[in-house]
Amino acid sequence: MPVYRTIPPPHILSRSLDLFLRSEAGSDFQSLLGLFPAAWKPVVMGGLLRDLLSQEILRVARAPADVDIVIFGAASISQVRDILETAIRSTNAFGGFKCQLRPHGIVFDLWRVEDHTNMAAAPCPHTIEQLLQHNLLDIDALLWDPATNILHDCGCQAAIQSERIDMMGPEGISRQFLAAQLAHVLVIAYKTNFSLSDKVREFIADASAKCPPLEIEQTLHRKHPQTASKIELFWNDLLAGGTPRCPDPTRAASL
């Protein structure tokens, strides 16, 4: 298990996150947080941080399509639905909601900490360290607390520096969302062009044997319609024992 670290500001993403908050997407983010009750503690995970960190470490340009928000302190998913009703556009693949404040604005994927992979069975009160350790991949184990501007890292920076994706541990594997998790792994491999560890390849093979192929394909086409066919080719190549690195470069030009 990677070492958990808390990194106070100023840190590697201080400038990037400040620029994000001053952008149109950042304005939407702050407006969304303004709808939250005082008892809720929102934290940011996922693609936004991974893309910003890739820009800082690898100097590659990436534009995140959404922002993942996990909420501590929400009494129920029904409470989240009632409070954010006007912003909710649909449910997401992991049991939360997709929210959007403007027709063409950035999308926010939002869920409660209790609804994150296997977190309902974790000891209470739930902590940020627990949340990171319940991720499937080390490259996703980075979190930003907007209230304090503190970064919480459990292997993400090391994964990006080594350009290699590894598993976090069994806590991150969900039988309920196995198809969505498999699709997520394939998408991250395609987006980053990082090599996959043997454990990640074993997960892909095992999950592929347990999930109907059509369910995986539908998830890929729903999440990434423009690149789904290329990701499927990469997936089939992996299952046939091919390259552990996505063969079709998708990185934008270096900064």
Image: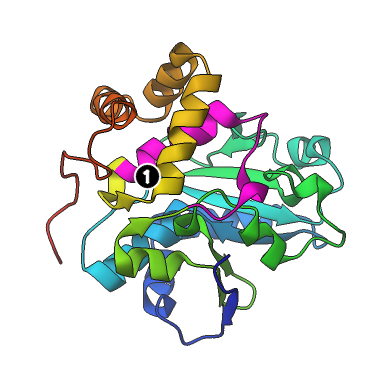
Compare residues 29 and 176 and report the one nearer the observer: 176
Q: Is residue 87 above or below residue 164?
A: above
Figure quadrant of residue 254: bottom left
Residue 167: where, in percent of width, then height? 50, 52
Residues 64 and 135: in front is 135
User: Magenta span has 29?
Assistant: no
The image shows residue 192 at horizontal and vertical percentages of 29, 50
Residue at the image position 77 percent from the left and 58 percent from the top: 40
Secondary structure character of the magenta stretch overall: helix
Q: Amino acid at mark 1?
A: Ile
The mark tally for this picture is 1
Please tell me which residue is depicted at 67% across the width and 33% down the height of the picture: 95
Considering every residue shown, the one lying at the far left of the view is 253
Q: Viewer-proximal residue, 173 or 27?
A: 173
The quadrant of the picture occupied by the C terminus is: bottom left
Residue located beneath label 1 in the image: 188
Q: Is residue 171 magenta?
A: yes
Q: Position of residue 241 (x, y in %)?
A: 28, 32
- Helix, strand or loop at mark 1: helix
39 up-or-down from 84: above or below: below
Q: Which residues are magenta?
A: 167-189
Judge by depth and name the residue closer to the eye, 243 or 39: 243
Q: Residue at x 25, y 28 (%)?
A: 237
Q: Please say which color scheme the image uses.
A: rainbow
Counting from the top left corner in percent of width and height, residue 30 is at: 56, 60
